[in-house]
Image (spheres, grey):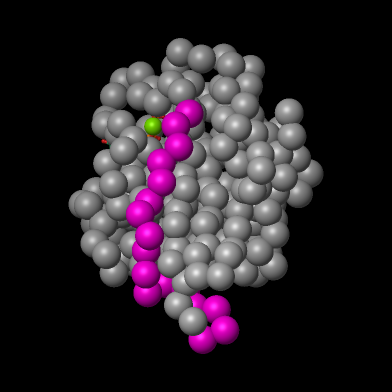
Amino acid sequence: MVDSNEMTINLVVLGRTQTGKSAAGNSLLGSSDFKSHRSPSSVTTCCSLGRSCCISGIIRRNGCELALRVRVLDTPSYPHTGLSKEQVRDTVRSALVHHFGKDGLHLALLVLRADLPLCPDERDQTTQFIQELLGPTWKDFTAVLLTHADKAEEAGLSEEAYLHSASSTLLSLLSSVQHKYIFLNNQKSIIKEERATVLRKLLNFIRQNNYQVLLLKH
Ligand SMILES: Nc1nc2c(ncn2[C@@H]2O[C@H](COP(=O)(O)OP(=O)(O)OP(=O)(O)O)[C@@H](O)[C@H]2O)c(=O)[nH]1
Ligand SMILES: [Mg+2]
């Protein structure tokens, strides 16, 4: 949504449990709105919307600076330790319609851990779930967020080296979403400059998709 001096981007985080979805939402919003901690059972059980304050210095249009607002929908994982697939799907679908039904969704962020290998079954389960939620054009509206980038770095892997040794499953997934991916370290609280870099990358993905939004219906 763009008016004369403001732009709002609508994002949703999706993925398996304990991958860092809520932490990533907090990093993007510059807040601690979403409950996020290590747990042997899934932490997030319902959807909630977080809103950033006005962020300046990120985006310009026709030579004028626009204030950016970010809205992130945090979601329960699929698979989930306490909810069935149908429960998660219905909850997320209703929340998407409720919060983004009018303005549309700019990007779904598929959250994966950079420090764990991605196996074909997991990829299939996750992408099928996203397809059920977003429909046949899901790849245009999905970017991959690789959390735990700090752990990959600790293991001595630069982003380039990481991708070089990544599984063919991950590489084919990244290719299927037109290489829209971002490495993220949620371990320490994100500093302003890092958040600006991540937001600029997300805006580039949205621009590449001609600022289209996905309109969600019940
Ligand atoms: N080292 C490191 N830890 C992270 C990162 N992102 C998340 N974590 C940690 O991983 C744990 C789980 O993070 P959450 O944000 O709760 O993950 P989630 O996907 O929302 O989990 P559920 O709601 O249970 O499905 C927390 O202890 C986070 O601090 C990261 O980039 N690096
Ligand atoms: Mg969570």
When the figure is inspected, residue 115 is found, relative to residue 127, above or below; the finding is: below
Tell how many labels. 0
Q: Return the residue found at the far left.
A: 188
Q: Who's the residue at 48% across and 39% down the image?
A: 73
When the figure is inspected, residue 181 is found, relative to residue 208, above or below; the finding is: above
Q: Who's the residue at 42% across and 72% down the image?
A: 58
Horizontal and vertical percent for residue 97? Answer: 64, 34
Horizontal and vertical percent for residue 216? Answer: 71, 39
Q: Who's the residue at 41% across and 46% down the image?
A: 51
Magenta stretch in the rendered image? 47-63
Horizontal and vertical percent for residue 181? Answer: 52, 59
In depth, the one of 128 and 37 nearer the eye is 37
Quarter of the image for residue 62 reads bottom right
Q: Relative to residue 24, is residue 76 drawn left or right?
A: right
In depth, the one of 85 and 153 nearer the eye is 85
Q: Relative to residue 150, is residue 116 drawn left or right?
A: right
Q: Can residue 181 be seen in this snapshot?
A: no
Q: Can residue 199 be seen in this snapshot?
A: yes
When the figure is inspected, residue 35 is found, relative to residue 188, above or below; the finding is: above
Q: Relative to residue 118, is residue 196 drawn left or right?
A: left
Quadrant assignment for the C terminus: top right
Quarter of the rendered structure image containing ligand 2: top left
Quarter of the image for residue 101 reads top right
Q: Relative to residue 72, is residue 102 drawn left or right?
A: right
Residue 55 magenta-drawn? Answer: yes
In depth, the one of 192 and 112 nearer the eye is 192
Q: Return the residue found at the far bottom.
A: 63
Quadrant assignment for the N terminus: bottom right
Q: Return the residue found at the far front.
A: 4
Q: Which is the main secondary structure of the residues drawn in magenta?
A: strand
Q: Who's the residue at 26% across and 57% down the image?
A: 190
